[in-house]
Image: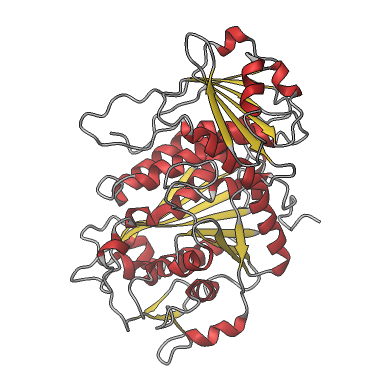
Amino acid sequence: MSLLPPPHKPFIRRRERLSERTAGTLDALLVLVPADADGALFAQLPESARWRALAGRARPVAATVRTSTLANARQTRAVLGFVRKGASTFETLALAGRMLREIAPRELKRVGLVAPADKAGLGLEALLAAVLAHGFSLPSFRARSGAHAALEHIELIGGKTLDLERIQAVSRANNLCRWLTALPPNKLDARGYRASIARLARSHRLRMRWLNESALKRLGANAFLAVSAGNAERTAGIAHLRYRPRRRRGAAPQVTLIGKGILFDTGGTNLKPHRAMLDMHTDMAGSAVALAALIALAELQAPIAVDAWLAITANRIGPSSYVPQEVVRAANGVTIQVIHTDAEGRMVLADTLALASRTRPRFMIDFATLTGACVHALTERMSGVFCNQPRLLEALLAAGRASGERVWGFPFDADYDSDLESKTADIMQCAPEGKGDHILATRFLSRFVPEQQAWAHVDLASAMRSGGLAHINSDITGFGVRYVLELLLGHHIDATLAPRA
């Protein structure tokens, strides 16, 4: 089985109106209307009396869904969702995801989508994003798994203002992120991940450089190497990818995306208990976010020079594993007193940030499933965001609101550094206690970012959530892909990568 998902791009056709004949070819017809709608929209739908009756069962309540079946030979499933006036992007996506759950047991090859015309097209975009996520299958290794009916055809009623190319690229990137994150650790090991990244780089004309352990040793990346030392094979490394638009071939990066790629996290010498270790194949989600976002930018031929740095290793336990109280020197010369070997993410990111900053990008942003403290603070509904320049914060928060992948800003005050003071090194890896670990982890990472370098850190509390999140109905959400693409493409920052006024 390939470590990359099979190519899949359903046909999308726009129509101004949906006939009964066309409706009869669909497996499902999803209609999203305002909760206070007057019913005029239903007159334009096939079997309009049935839709009016469906809406009239009771007083419409926002964020609820009703279902019926159309009287055609295909028995098209009719799904009606009510959205409140002024609903946020997250609320609209969540409603679209709820509508898809109503038809989850049914094979979905052909689907129709209807939403009231509005300037932003938010309702129709939410339905389309939800369908493209629902129609994608995560990897399965069952011996007798039946062939999944792939989504083939989407009838889009209206949507003249929608940028279909961008919506599809973002959805494919989210699907790629979820696919990679879902792969078992004996399938997606460092060797396989490197080969998959190289294959994606070739197919999207990206330049790729692989820094193996020997190269990292020469570069002084001893924080990364401390973590990778516990691996049985010497296959860990950092992947450096470059995308350049045609007119900026030799340019320095404007944006650098950085991802934590811990392929499995045992906790190392400070071994995790069973339940905490069970899903640790997903600890590479940050690298999948950065990789998938870069692929989408290349597909869209975005006018931004972008690099990605992916820190890829496992955190294993063994005779060579690093242990508490070791002192290691990172690539930028900062010495680290190791406190807890399960704080490996900040170790690999320390060197990756230091190396990436040498290319002098205008803006760096990293993604990592870094701390349980962030999950305890926010649950899995939002992720945490930090930045070292206050002027960036509103742009970072606005991108979360616009994308529907919400983030919450946490403190970045320097007085937190006193909790990381070390008697034997420049800085402690973490505090012996777990209080505010998401904040302290970010303050630790800041020591490996030049002071003048604009930088943001996203702690991916939302990478996994039981039952999914918003329009994504799988436990692995791919959170971060929509967010960073909205940040870079949605005009939250201008051409000089300063916050938009």
Q: Nearer the viewer, residue 113 or 430?
A: 113
In front here: 462 or 484?
462
Question: Can you give x and y, in whole percent of width and height, for residue 219 in the image?
Answer: 41, 67
**Observer-nearest of 198 and 23:** 23
Q: Residue 497, percent across and down? A: 71, 55
Residue reaching furthest to the left: 319
Q: Is residue 358 visible in the rendered structure shown here? A: no
Determine which quarter of the picture holds residue 434.
bottom left
- Look at the picture and state if 403 lies above or below 261: above
Residue at x 63% of width, y 79% of height? 413
Say which residue appears at 54% left-offset and 83% top-offset.
417
Considering only vertical position in the picture, is 347 above or below 398?
Answer: below
Hey, which residue is sitting farthest front in the picture?
Answer: 58
Q: Kindly indicate the quadrant of the structure image that contains residue 149.
A: top left
Query: Horizontal and vertical percent for residue 327?
Result: 36, 82
Which image quarter is the N terminus in?
A: top left
Residue 138 in the image, given as x and y percentages of width and height: 38, 37
Q: Residue at (44%, 88%) from the top-left corner?
A: 422
- From the viewer's side, name the closer residue of 339 and 272: 272
Check the picture and name the quadrant holding the C terminus: bottom right
Residue 70's place in the image compared with 31, above or below, is above
Confirm whether residue 492 shows in the render: yes
- On screen, residue 72 versus residue 179, left or right, reads right
Q: Which residue is depicted at the point 58% across and 31% down?
A: 128
